[in-house]
Image: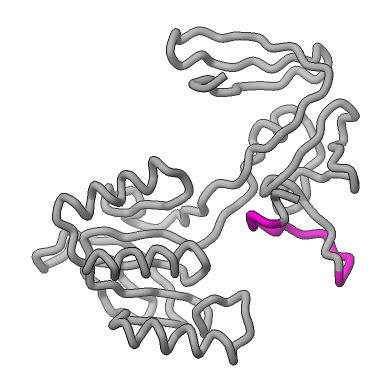
Amino acid sequence: RVHHDVRSIDREAKTVTARDLVRDVDVVLPYDALVLATGADPIVPPLPGIDRPQVRTLRTVPDADVLRRMLDEGATKAVVIGAGFIGLETVEAFRHRGLEVSLVEMAPQVLPAIDAEMAVLVQAELRAHNVDVRVGTGFVAIEDSATEHPVDVVLSDGSRLAADVVLLGVGVKPSTSLARDAGLELSDRGAVVVTPDQRTSDPAIWAVGDAIQVIDAVTGVPGVVPLAGPANR
């Protein structure tokens, strides 16, 4: 059922209420077993100017369509905030399109998830492709620009980066509002708590993917690993 937005789960009645977005009516769907695969949402920090139309996230194909349209309409200068996987892939795509790109990362290196000895090689490759890399620096606001570009990204060191498009790639959080409203057990980080066979605190409901808490195979410590490989497994 495409074009249906699930609004609530009634665990006692074992039904899901969804909004048919085409007919604009609610439908009630019964279940014997329910699987939640709601994924993750982009983190959007509550900073001044974050709601400006030039500030985008990249999580879905429609998100990519918006970015492509902005480039087609003449964007020439981009600031990418966050040097994780999404941020770096977007930097590469922007450079292939000929944009001038600045990359801002609060950690002291790009790709904070990997060892520093490896990250320095990635950082050198970025600079070899004329990417302005700013590590150890956060951003504090998005403001009007005095340049020909519409906005400035104001950094924590006081510098300003003019941009036509600002891409937020600062991470994701489990998308678990449905589970929370249904009263399922969540972790401190808001992920759905599951057993080793993916069962939630409700014996008729399972959860998978980026929305769940997993147990680290090395440390045994529970955590969240929002990556495609573990999500698929």
Image quadrant in which you'd find residue 35: top right
Q: In percent of the image, x 62 and y 75: which residue is there?
A: 113
Dominant SS of magenta comes to: loop
Quadrant placement of the N terminus: top right
Coordinates of residue 27 in the picture (x, y in percent): 60, 9
**Left or right for 181, reference 112:** right
Q: Can residue 227 be found in the magenta stretch? A: yes
Q: In percent of the image, x 43 and y 79: which residue is there?
A: 137
Image quadrant in which you'd find residue 96: bottom left
Coordinates of residue 67 in the picture (x, y in percent): 30, 51
Is residue 186 or residue 194 the one in the foreground? Answer: 194
Coordinates of residue 18 in the picture (x, y in percent): 59, 17
**Left or right for 80, reference 41:** left
Magenta region, residue range: 218-229
Q: Can residue 101 be found in the magenta stretch? A: no
**Left or right for 32, reference 208:** right
Coordinates of residue 73 in the picture (x, y in percent): 15, 50
Tell me if residue 154 comes above or below residue 57 in the rendering.
Answer: below
